[in-house]
Image (tube, rainbow, N blue to C red):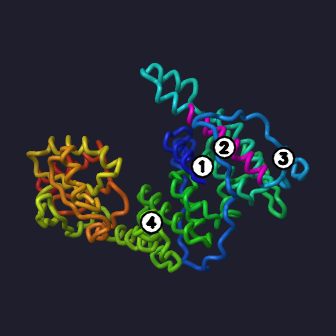
Amino acid sequence: MRYRRSIAVASWALGFLPLARPAAGGEEPRSASLSVAPVGAAPGAAPAAPAATTATNKSPGEAAPLGKPKFALKNSAAAAGGAGAAAADRAAEAKRLIDGYHGLALQYAYKLTRARTAEEKAAIVAKHEPSEKTVRPFARLLAELAAVEPRDEPALDALLFLVKYAGLPEIDAILANTPVAAGDYSAPQLQPLGLVLEFHADNPRLAGVVKEFPPAPDTDAFLLALFQKTHSPQNRAAAGMRLIQVLQQAERGEQAEAVAAAMAEDRYLEGVPITARPKGPHARDWAQGKLHELRRLAVGQTLPDVGGTTLDGRAAHIADYRGKVVVLSVWTTWCGPCRAAIPHEAALAERLRDQPFALLSVNCDAEQETLAKFLETTPMPWDHWWVGMDGEFSKALSISAFPTVFVLDAEGVIRGKNVAGADLDQAVDALLAELEAGGEPAN
């Protein structure tokens, strides 16, 4: 499963074929209304472990030829390799097709890294960028594979591939013209998310997959349905966490709060780890912290008077900064996005050094010495605190990701969260203009 997840994340991150597309007429993608039911049934028996996959010896980016399917998938007869085909054969075929497409995508990414000029890059994009036409033959064969036996692991591989490209017209046409007929289950067309819910809601693989689901039409409805249906605590935790993130990004705070409240009350999420760290938070703890964040750390609320230790060992508190606009950035030295933000933070601090403004970086490395050594080689000439990992500061502000950014006005009220780049500049400048005008919101 590991290689599939990493490749899928890479293809989404590179934006080859985005999931979300505006509806016709420029309308926003539809969002389902959410109604979170209380936790009901206890987790059932653990589902069977997924079939093992054979490692490939091909180098990254080497795409296998697509060709024709190795067996007639539209024919459900066992002799023709349809629904009665051996699971190993279906698994090999699904892997061949998925690896084939991802090989093309990786080849494209590799060619882009080799381009030396803008002209070379434009030529590569024009000739090799994956498109609907590229994914169409893979999607067609994988849709057929899933349609004849949607219950097994190869079908789940195929369905998860198809989920990423549903919403593209040519792919939707394939799905609409692929009927499902497997035993006592039939449907006029193949719906990947629906089949995942119907037959794979308890599959342990979903816990890793749903964490990467991008916001898209029907994503929130699928995550809510999985959250309410699955008997797997791991899947319920992963679906709930991703659903809350999607709802927060859509500024649907009340619905995010409802999901967090359901998770916080769910005794089956007690002890379910959500990170690889041995002493990392568990799902129910995370949900309780998220509920606190949604209720007490929302925009418009006053930030709690948290404190930390300055570089010279003094105790400091956020109340010390009253009268100034504050950007509070919670970070670690090992966080890539945090380090990438340092040049912009430096420019912001320099531009506003004579203004009633403070940039406060709060470090969560396990050892203060780690921060001190980092600052010896990376100049960051502004205020710093060290608070350690998983301490009272992180609990008070429900820190679960780095960087976490709060923008505070001169009264300590949260006026923005997790903004960066030009958006951060704009938020700070507006608050400074408001402060200069005597506290009246700037136009």
In this rendering, position of residue 180 left or right of residue 158: right
Q: Quadrant of residue 133?
A: top right
Q: From which residue to which does the magenta span run?
A: 88-107
Residue at disc 2, secondary structure: helix
Residue at which label 1 appears: 4
Nearest to the observer: residue 386 or residue 17: 386
Q: In the image, residue 363 lies at what x, y percent?
A: 25, 58
Q: Mark 2 or mark 3, which is nearer the start of the sequence?
A: 3
What is the CA distance from the residue labelled 3 to the residue labelled 4?
Answer: 42 Å
Is 52 drawn above or below residue 298 in the view shown? above
Cβ atoms at labels 2 and 1 below 8 Å apart: yes
Residue 33 included in the magenta stretch of the image: no
- Residue 176 in sight from this viewpoint: no
Cβ atoms at labels 4 and 2 below 8 Å apart: no
Amino acid type at mark 4: Ala
What is the CA distance from the residue labelled 4 to the residue labelled 2?
Answer: 34 Å
Residue at which label 2 appears: 98
Residue at which label 3 appears: 74
Q: Mark 2 or mark 4, which is nearer the start of the sequence?
A: 2
Nearest to the observer: residue 365 or residue 175: 365
By secondary structure, the bulk of the magenta-drawn segment is best described as helix
Is 349 drawn above or below residue 330 in the view shown? above
What is the CA distance from the residue labelled 2 to the residue labelled 1?
Answer: 9 Å
Residue at disc 1, secondary structure: helix
What is the CA distance from the residue labelled 3 to the residue labelled 1?
Answer: 25 Å
Q: Quadrant of residue 184?
A: bottom right
In this rendering, position of residue 161 left or right of residue 358: right
- Residue 304 in sight from this viewpoint: yes
In this rendering, position of residue 288 left or right of residue 299: right
Crowding near the residue tagged with mark 4, few <14, some 14–19, many ≥20 C-alpha atoms within 10 Å: many
Which of the two discs, 3 and 1, sits closer to the camera?
1
